[in-house]
Image (cartoon, grey):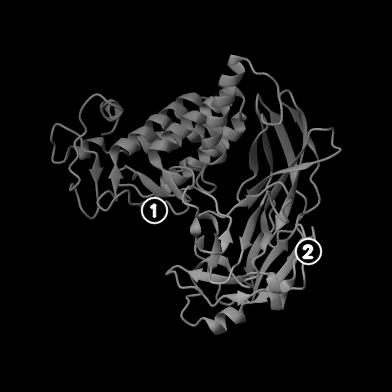
Amino acid sequence: MDLTAPSLLERMGTELRKFPVESAIPAKQGLNSLRLTWTSNAGGDWVAIAAGTGWTAKNLVGTDTLSFWLYTATSLAADALPKVFMEDNSNNKTTKISISPYSADLPAATWMRIRIPMSVFFDSSPLVNFSQIKTVGYGQNLADGISHTLLIDDVRVYEGSGTSDPVAPPTGLVAAGYDSHAFLTWKPNTESFLQGYEIHLSTDGGVTYQLRKIIPKTDSTCTDFVRSIGTNLSMIYRIKALNSANEPSEFSDPANCSTRDFSDDELKTMVQEATFRYFWEYGHPASGMARERLGSGNTVTIGGSGFGVMALLVGIERGFITRQQGIDRILRILNFLENADRFHGVWSHWIDGNTGNVIPFSTKDNGADLVESAFMIQGLLAVRQYFQGNDAEEELIRQKITSLWEAVEWSWFRKNNENVLYWHWSPNYGWDMNLQIRGWMEASIVYMLAVASPTY
């Protein structure tokens, strides 16, 4: 946000570079809207820009409409509305386009949708790269010396009508109450045009509902912290699905839960179950493996998955999942491990959870990682010991783990029969990493497993 005196512009943040957010007046979509308060004076200027999550650039080539919603507490003449522009990744700005030709006078306390054809930006701004647009901005127009406030929401660029088929109400909603939060799960919608979900809460027996959160379409769980509302709450949750036009479905069936004061043991169980959910609910959907970290996409980690399979055993014992659920996940992981890239029986640190191909940890760390693989084998041996049933699935688990365990060529990692094991080997760079495994630390498990190996 930039300002040139004598114009005035409300700005937020220590550097006065942030767009103010409005949450007291209900937004058109979601939990809040942008608040634009300005006074345009002759000789001055201002601009205020809004970016998407992470400032990720969008390809707008082929789109035909810029759409956003405006709200004013008092009526506002169209010619007093600001201008609008876009900016690409190289900081090239489009021509600033006046909103007034595309809007009637705004009535008081009413959300009004504005639609501007993208052609006016394309035709007036040939130097802008519309395949890499990072922001939409608003700027000074009429220098009337009057303070104005607009709320701005649901800024979108699209091709076609901007409408979408309706989505079905979500199903299978379950709510569990804890000391200070509720945890919700539901069956994910399957529509290709699904945009996300709205979480609604009632604390007055279902008389009124408050929108609590917007959840992305990739999630079918929600943690809602409610301590700011009160303690020992009786709560009813309902959720809606959103289509690609941000239009909500009908409500789901309600799910009831309550918060209560937890004992120390209940608090410990809560933390343990929440930790378990990282491995269970955030496990890679294709491979079942543990992701490297939150937001790592298809990058799964071999060592972390060793910890993850042991966490599955704890989850079964604690009743967080059923034994059959654990069996199903373990078999999915084992099938993936059998087909993933291996080097003398050893996996890489990072693997693509869809393909099983190596994802290099660094340039020369693009092959075997003996320490991380030891963590995986350690976890698998615990799984083999746990599933001792006589049914076909548990026997298959034991057989697959034994095969993976016996395929690890521990002795080969002595590098020409040295009396030490080496951490890395690359199909392209050989032993260039040259990192010996020494000392009493977490990597000591490598030597314990190597000594115990029935084959190498």
Q: Amino acid at mark 1?
A: Asn
**Is 324 rendered above or below residue 99?**
above
Residue at 53% x, 49% y: name it: 286
Quarter of the rendering containing residue 74? bottom right
Quarter of the rendering containing residue 73? bottom right
Instruction: Determine whether the residue tagged by mark 1 lies in a helix, strand or loop.
Output: loop
- The picture places residue 169, in percent across and down from the top left corner, at 77, 50
Mark 2 or 1 closer to N-term? 2
Q: Nearer the viewer, residue 345 or 168?
A: 168
Residue that mark 2 sits on: 75
Residue furthest bottom in the image: 123
Q: Nearer the viewer, residue 82 or 317?
A: 82
Residue that mark 1 sits on: 357
- The picture places residue 303, in percent across and down from the top left corner, at 38, 37
- The picture places residue 261, in percent across and down from the top left corner, at 67, 18
**Is 263 rendered above or below residue 275?**
above
**Mark 2 vs 1: CB contact within 8 A:** no
Which label belongs to residue 391? none
Distance in Å between CA atoms under marks 2 and 1: 60 Å
Instruction: Determine whether the residue tagged by mark 2 lies in a helix, strand or loop.
Output: loop
Determine if residue 193 is in view. Answer: no
